[in-house]
Image (tube, grey):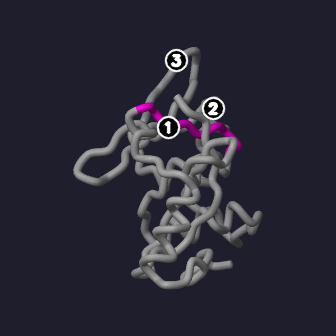
Amino acid sequence: MIPVKVRDVVLDSVQNPLLLLVDLNETIVLPIGIGFWEAQAIVLKLHGHLPPRPMTHDLIKSLCHELGAKVVKIVVNDIKDNTFYAEIYLTAADRELVIDARPSDAVALALTVGCPIYLTDKVAAYTISLQELADQSSESSGDPHEGGPLLH
């Protein structure tokens, strides 16, 4: 498995949010299309903004704490029909639990609890270099900076 981190959330050429997961050396990137509200939640976490009321990911963190469970890691583990899949690994009462999740929700939870994020080798096959991403952005929009970071 390849450890990754959230680099940013940006808008693609048709203004859809893309979650950018990069390896720790920032040489490869996995762009994942996500919904607007999920993108907003991730951007808020990235910038340390605290909403006035708990978001879903904050609620899950609180539930885990109260139930004695711990989120251990997030794994973006599969792609089917152009849709990425993720799993949330938890420990509770000496058991390991694996929960299916959308990558956007799993990543927002990882940012909330501070756990690592990984890609399986199968998913890593869909990564591209950061240079390829920049080239694709400039080809599709004429301006590599058009669209820019979401909600910045």
Residue at the spot of label 3:
95
Q: Horizontal placement of 97 versus 94: left or right? A: left
Identify residue for label 1.
Answer: 119
147 in relation to 121, above or below: below
User: Vertical placement of 120 versus 45: above or below?
Assistant: above
Residue 81 horizontal side relative to residue 110, left or right: left
- Determine the residue positioned at 60% across, 80% down: 145
Q: Amino acid at mark 3?
A: Arg
| The image quarter in which residue 99 lies | top left
Residue 54 locus on image (x, y percent): 64, 62
SS at mark 1? Answer: strand
Looking at marks 1 and 3 on the same chain, the residue that comes earlier in the sequence is marked by 3
Residue in front for this viewpoint, 4 or 45: 4
> SS at mark 3?
strand
How would you rate the neighbour count of disc 1 (Cα within 10 Å): few for under 14, some for 14-19, many for 20 or more? many
**Residue drawn at point x = 52 percent, y = 28 percent:** 1
Front position in the image: 39 or 1: 1
In this rendering, the answer to whether 99 lies above or below 138 is above
* Mark 2 secondary-structure assignment: strand
Circle 2: residue type: Lys
- The residue singled out by tag 2 in the image is 70
Q: Is residue 93 magenta?
A: no
**Magenta stretch bounds:** 113-121
Judging depth in this view, the residue of 105 and 53 nearest the camera is 105
